[in-house]
Image (cartoon, rainbow, N blue to C red):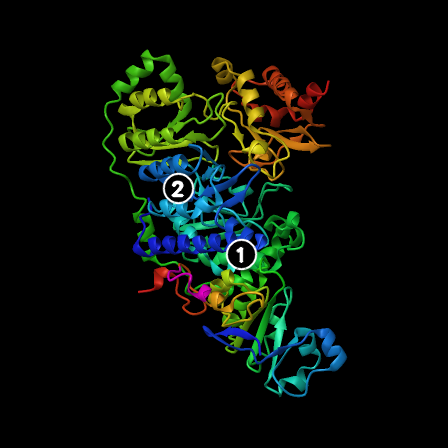
Amino acid sequence: MPEMIRDGEIVSNEWQRLDADSIAENGVPESGKVIVPLAVWQAKKEALKARGDIGVCLDPGEEPEALADDVSALPLVAINFPAFKDGRGYSYARELRTRFGFTGELRAVGDVLRDQLFYLWRVGFNAFEVRDDRDIQEALSGLKDYTVTYQGDVHDPRPIYRRA
Amino acid sequence: MYVYQDHDQTLLEERVAQFRDQTRRYLAGSLSEDEFLALRLQNGLYIQRYAPMLRIAVPYGLLASKQLRTLAHVARTWDKGYAHVSTRQNIQLNWPAVEDVPDILAELAAVQMHAIQTSGNCIRNVTTDEFAGVNPDEIEDPRPWCEIIRQWSTFNPEFAYLPRKFKIAVNAVPDADPALIGVHDIGVQVIRDGNGDTAFQVWAGGGLGRTPMTGQVIGECVAWPDLLAYLEAILRVYNKYGNRDNKYKARIKILVKALGAEKFRELTEREFAELQGGPMTLTDAEVTRMRGYFTDLDYQPAGDGSALRQALDSDKAFSRWFHTNTRAHKHDGYRAVVLSLKKTGRAPGDISDEELEAVADLADRYSFGELRNTHQQNMVLADVRDEDLFALWQALDGLGFATPNFKLMTDMIACPGGDFCALANAKSLPIAEAIQRRFDDMDFLHDLGELDINISGCMNACGHHHIGHIGILGVDKKGREYYQITVGGRGDKVSKVGSKIGPSFEADEVPDVIAKLLDVYLESRLENEAFINTVERVGVEPFKERVYA
């Protein structure tokens, strides 16, 4: 199984992420942990919701509001970064955590690289599928780039001027 | 000025270590060109036409003398011995080597300087009035608010990969716009609410560049504790909905225009409703702390003014400089002094290592060890005693910084242009110099009065050509450099974009075109009427007719 980072550790990735085309062809596998696109989730929500091993992937342009009623039922939400420079996912992550109170695994997928990891972690991602041509051990150290932050974040909402 | 605490210093040192590692990985080939591009830009490092360019942040333009000395040392050691003041009040080095940048950053960090977010699609250096804190017209010192915004925007994790660059300016002068908030992505106007408390009118959607436009008021009256929550709300709307498909349509101005101010306000208010009253709310203690860094300096009581009067009466050159290059100060007995970096033959805004050191000495001797960069690419010693003005003028004259042309025609803004910049379509500096050489008679310039000529080498508009009373824009026509002229822009009381007068010109035609524009003004002006006021009274048409006759 490929490796990924979850909660600051390198672990095996036991989730399978499927795109709309493969689901259209083969359907959603009957069992196993599967991440499906938002459109698939919305189309088959009633059936999938009960399973508890289905996660949803949001692409840029697909706002977390679409999952507002589902966050408590979802064990995992993935946010896709087709290119690391497209920063919409940062606001989506923050919204999922703070506005919608999502407490499950929030996973960054796509063009996920070491130098963005610290920011991604601060806005609420706890899991990272680092691009597979990169050294995951090195990427892990990206979570420790800074010890000082000025703003609050999802881990500590207090900005520096409200901390003791 | 703001004094770094241990945590601020730690943050800078962590930044140096991070960028050192990023540079190492880039040079070792494990970071791609494109990945490093985004990272180095967020650290102010461009790869330019002939060499890299490093843009060093000068928060709201304010520098301490020890920082000037470090800049001199850096320019001498790693560059060609000079630096350049930019229109965002920053400092640029034009010739550093990529592999030296981590060492340069370490040197800068030792005096609390950095290049964080001076470029890239993130929140840039916050700017304000270069006379902030001493300007008799301001309702309060805007710099504590600038510093609060600086800290909020520094490494803000949510807004590091915006659709496009993002510039914030703060102005505390009513009825004038010295910080150009009208042409910023966000402009913050410090106001008083109904109870006399500090509040903010928040503008969004202004900007120069390819599609210049002035911003619109989004927040009519934002209470001071809510400032950061309101800014965060705007940024979140922009981050989610700004155009990411076309970089020429990616600035917030395009979004605000497309949605309309009403809809944009509605989206902002929705985000704001969630943030208001939350942990981002500013505290009394924090604002008091920030104001504490910008309290009155140790001003001495005003003298009797006789020495100054005598010098003004007896020395005509000094008197001319005094009236042109010094400004009224909040405190009796003090003036703010503009150092003109616009002597003919000097690239506007350039300053050498030795000059930086000399200016640092003057700041220590005459102005509490502080100096400001201005967006017009000059420098300011903001707190000079009347008694010291004559001696300071003599020293500045010796350095070539006493040209009495502040706000006059030869006090031009010009970007580095095609001589340095890879983006430029045409050169800027030779145009500036040709104009300075053609119009070098001080009596004539003083008779002309206030006139802003702004020159940009391409439509990214770093030289603010749209808001020049006369704007000059370098364009490329079939591989040749041409210059398009606009008239009637302004960036003083209000921001206004100038009108194109017609087809563009070759470089050597530009001074003649300027001469014709001046002729029309001189023939049409009413008594004491400035160039821009004549343009606004008679319209652009007579200028156009004369130029293309």
Cα separation, mark 1 vs mark 2, equals 27 Å
Whether residue A18 is visible to the viewer of this picture, yes or no, is yes
With respect to residue A63, does B449 lie above or below? above
Whether residue B133 appears in this view of the structure is no
Which residue is the site of mark 1?
B235
- Please state, as top left, top right, bottom left or bottom right, where the C terminus of chain B lies in the image: top right
Residue type pointed to by label 1: Leu
How many numbered circles are shown? 2
Helix, strand or loop at mark 2: loop
Q: Chain of mark 1?
A: B
In the rendered image, residue B11, in percent from the top left (x then y), is placed at: 37, 56
Looking at the rendered structure, whether the residues under marks 1 and 2 are on a common chain is answered as yes
Residue located farthest toward the front when viewing the structure as drawn: B28
Up the image or down, B221 lies above or below B483; here it is below
> Which residue is labeled 2 in the image?
B139
Extent of the magenta region: A141-149
In screen coordinates, is A148 left or right of B483?
left
Q: Give the amino acid type for the residue marked by disc 2 in the picture.
A: Ile
Of tags 1 and 2, which is closer to the observer? 1
Q: Residue at x 39, y 65 (%)?
A: A158
Check the picture and name the quadrant holding the N terminus of chain B: top left
Q: Which residue corresponds to the image point at 30% horizontal and 17% vertical from the top-left?
A: B309
